Image (cartoon, rainbow, N blue to C red):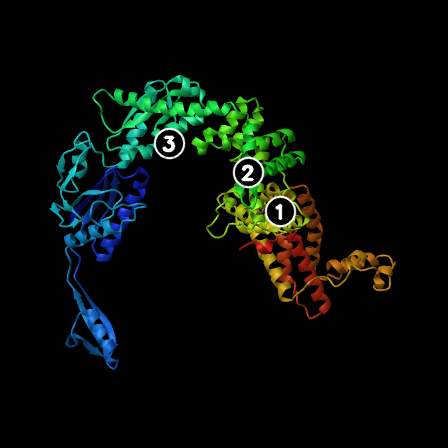
Amino acid sequence: MADFLLELLSEEIPARMQAKARNDLARLFAEHVEAAGLSVGPIDTHSTPRRLVLLARDVADATEASREELKGPRTSAPPQALEGFLRKTGLLREQLIERDGVYFALVEKPGQSSAVILADTVTRIINDFPWPKSMRWGDGQLRWVRPLQGIVAILGESILPGFMGDVVAGATTVGHRFHHPGPITVGGANDYVEKLRACHVIVDQNEREQIIRTEAQKAATDAGLTLLEDEGLVVENAGLTEWPVPLLGRFDPEFLDVPREVIVLTMRTNQKYFACTGADGLLAPAFVCVANIAANDGGAAIAEGNTRVLAARLSDARFFWEQDLKVPLEEQAKKLDGIVFHERLGTVAAKVDRIAKIARWLAEQGFVNADPQQAERAARLAKADLVTGMVGEFPELQGIIGGHLARAQGEPDDVANAIRDHYAAPGAPVSAAVALADKLDTIAAFFAIDQRPTGSKDPFGLRRAAISSIDIIVSNGLRLNLTGAVRGTLANLAGQLGGDGNVHRLDRTAPEVIAFFADRLKVQQRDAGVRHDLIDAVFSLGGEDDLVRLLARVNTLQQFVETPEGADLLTAYKRSANILKKEDWTGPQVLSSREEQGIPQTGEEDPLVLVEEPGMREAIAEMALGTAGADLPQERALIAALDDAEPKASSAIESEDFTAAMAALASLRKPIDDFFDHVTVNDPDSAKRERRLNLLMRFRDAVNGVADFSKIEG
């Protein structure tokens, strides 16, 4: 056995592509050697800005020889079938074996050396590598992410033969671009990492990341600052450097009058710098950059140069900020008339008008405990920063810039915060009203024009908007009638579009929007461990669209059905439901009141209605409930249990005490079990059979009063 080293040296590989490239390299190598039957031990892959590396341990010397018997055509088959089989096996007719009227071929494959297999594997990997973007260079046809400059392929101590384009495989690579730019000859997998380290190249990306984490933190701490941790920046800087050296730099404190998010984003996105804060938690005029060189002056010149570059960036940002401050957000909002939100839904200004009305309505109805005027004011200004220079330069800061401008221009904090937070899932009342109004309008509007998500396609982000809406409602405990809110939002849109036809057409969309929310709720709650069938069980009751109450009910139901009492009750429910379904039993055949009879009564259609004998009305009611004539103690016990549990469950649900409702249901467990153990439902006596079926139906309906148990799995 021997170890195998593969290094693919190229010009700079983008940092964002390196993690996937390492995985693809390991996958392709494993697939090819497995297909060839070559035994290989552990595989490690590494990347630097200039190289992709694979180290495979314990590679077998060769594959094992094999002997395989292949079944061919029958001896009576047409000659063409035999010719095809001979071509496939590479044998002559005389070398085949006849057995039971069928040709067989013994194919022997000698073992193949690992060197030959690995040389072929390297060629296949380079040709098949799935870079997101690749390029050709010079006159060749070879494609790689950047021009390929060298291939090191060594098995044990032997260089594998081969070349790709004009790049010949060998044992020579290069060290750090500045510290050791000359050629290095490596002996193989065993000395590769340490030889590169001696030439200022740390091959392992995890080691470089750890250096950046530790040294960047130390650079900030030594200066009395706190580093703003950013794992994305750590990985990106590790992908940009082969010898990372974190350095502390400073910038002019006058730039701190620019919003903090702008400074941090400028440093992060444009310069890959870490931001720092002072002892007061505020942003400090300092940064940590990561150099790719151990400079003789300790990095002073590098930090100074980076300071100058950053100053230019921050000067641009401050210019946009100062220009935006001069224009009130109300004036900026007027420009939204010129921005199309969607060709069938009008401009952004039209959307803002709809959001403002919904936000005010949410506050006025008490669904959100916010000042209606502030909610409407914030909604009307929320999108105004889209036309500012700062958001034009930094689109990631939509809302944030609006919030800063609103505060600087004298808007109340609640309004400014609502503008800042309306793209997220905020907690403050005014913010929640604006954010929820925005998302409800987006979902309803696109459903209204038949632009629903389909399959994996959701170009307008409606699934994300629904999840965010649910987050806002649930996390803020908003007792919102969702159906009413959706219908109101659709009516608001219809009012803007004009015409009675639109009102009726859009209102018919409401059930689809509610069903969409129900699906998203199940997806959202799945991560929280809530069963989707239980959500269906509560949703199926109809009329339950208060998500806060619904989830409280679902959570209590989940706790209940996972107890022995709940599991047994579910079993009894399903047994009852199956009997009723099999018997096609639809309910009592006695109508005990004028209302239940459902038709105008003269007193002649149902003589029982006019009977005034004492106890007759009670007897009629008993017939309707299936309680009259119960002759077995188990029947009477179940009736008594239902008489006790039904009002308790109903009362508990009314007061939203779902634990008490489940406890009431749990009291039915023993009576229903005893009923099934001792009572024959399909008694030959038709009156008994009818009475017992009615009793089972009463039990089923009592359970369904809490949740539709037919939707519960198990």
Callout 3–callout 1 Cβ contact below 8 Å = no
The amino acid type found where label 3 is placed reads Thr
Q: What residue would you read off at disc 1?
A: 662
Residue 616: x and y in percent read: 83, 59
Q: Please name whichever residue, 354 or 235, is drawn nearer the observer in this view of the structure.
A: 354
| Vertical placement of residue 524 versus 79, above or below | above
- Most extreme residue toward the front is 338
The amino acid type found where label 1 is placed reads Met
- Most extreme residue toward the bottom is 76
Q: Please name whichever residue, 519 or 434, is drawn nearer the observer in this view of the structure.
A: 434
Residue 348: image tag: 2
Q: Please name whichever residue, 330 or 306, is drawn nearer the observer in this view of the structure.
A: 330
Q: Nearer the viewer, mark 2 or mark 3?
A: 2
| Vertical placement of residue 214 versus 556, above or below | above
Residue 269: image tag: 3
SS state under label 1: helix
User: Which sits earlier in the primary sequence, circle 1 or circle 2?
Assistant: 2
Horizontally, residue 593 falls left or right of residue 369, namely right
